[in-house]
Amino acid sequence: MELQWPLILFTTLLAWAAGLFGAQCLWALRGRGAKAQMPALIVSVALLAVGGIAVFFHLEHWERIFNGFGHMTSGITQELIAIVVLAVVMVVYFVYLRRSGDEARVPAWLAVAGLVLAVVLVVVMGHSYMMASLPAWDSLLQIGSLLGAACAFGPATMAVICAVRDEASDLDAKANVIGQCANVVLVGALSATLDIPAEIWERAVAERVPARTVEANLAALAAGRAFMDTTEEA
């Protein structure tokens, strides 16, 4: 299947936006990066908007996208709801930043809500791509890889903004190390499953076997072989 760049941009930019907003909520909870809060919010909103626009270029008839909004179970409807809810929280976040002036403080409940909704948006976005017709996508590891991207992009961008605003702190390095490690583990887990022979996936599609079942069976098979090899060596 050829690369679908609009979808790549959509998922990448939304993961980046969610990761950055989640990172600034974390910084707010820790009382760090006051001067970086407003610039970070502006960047995350811009990424969210550009990512949302990018998805329209995936459709030959983009106006038909509105036909899917009438079905609550459709992925595009769930994504829209998650984006709108997060956008509303961003607006409330902006209001509190404006009211607090140079202190750039937001209530703890708002920072926690923003962090949770950022995660929810990435999960909903990843879940919308899970379908039996595309076994490589029909996996929880695919959602994990998007969460990994958010963990990598968010803290890194927040650290850069803090550095530009002369507000670097110990949180920058700690959050980046944890975020990058999470990204390596989650993306690496997905990459490992993509090496599964094509004929196994084709058979799974033909028999309508969920990708998660295939992964579990392969893991059990690998563990069994490892046990047998250990027994023979002993």
Image: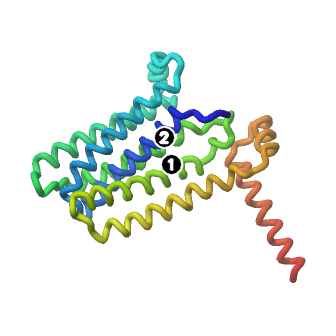
- Relative to 114, is 195 on the left or the right? right
Q: Quadrant of the N terminus?
A: top right
Give the residue drawn at x 48%, y 40%: 11
Check the image and name the residue furthest to the front: 164
Say which amino acid is labelled 2: Thr
- Mark 2 falls on what kind of element? helix
Q: Position of residue 117 (x, y in %)?
A: 36, 46
Q: Position of residue 103 (x, y in %)?
A: 12, 57
Q: Is residue 189 above or below residue 224?
A: above
Say which label, 2 or 1, has the lower sequence index. 2
> Which residue bears the numbered disc 1?
146
Q: Nearer the viewer, residue 113 or 99?
A: 99
- Relative to 83, is 8 on the left or the right? right
Give the residue drawn at x 38%, y 47%: 18
Query: How far separated are the C-alphas under marks 2 and 1?
Result: 8 Å
> Which residue bears the numbered disc 2?
11
Give the residue drawn at x 20%, y 44%: 94
Check the image and name the residue furthest to the bottom: 234
Q: Is residue 177 above or below residue 105?
A: below
Q: Is residue 172 above or below residue 60?
A: below
Q: Position of residue 164 (x, y in %)?
A: 25, 58
Question: Residue 187 is drawn in which quadrant?
Answer: bottom right
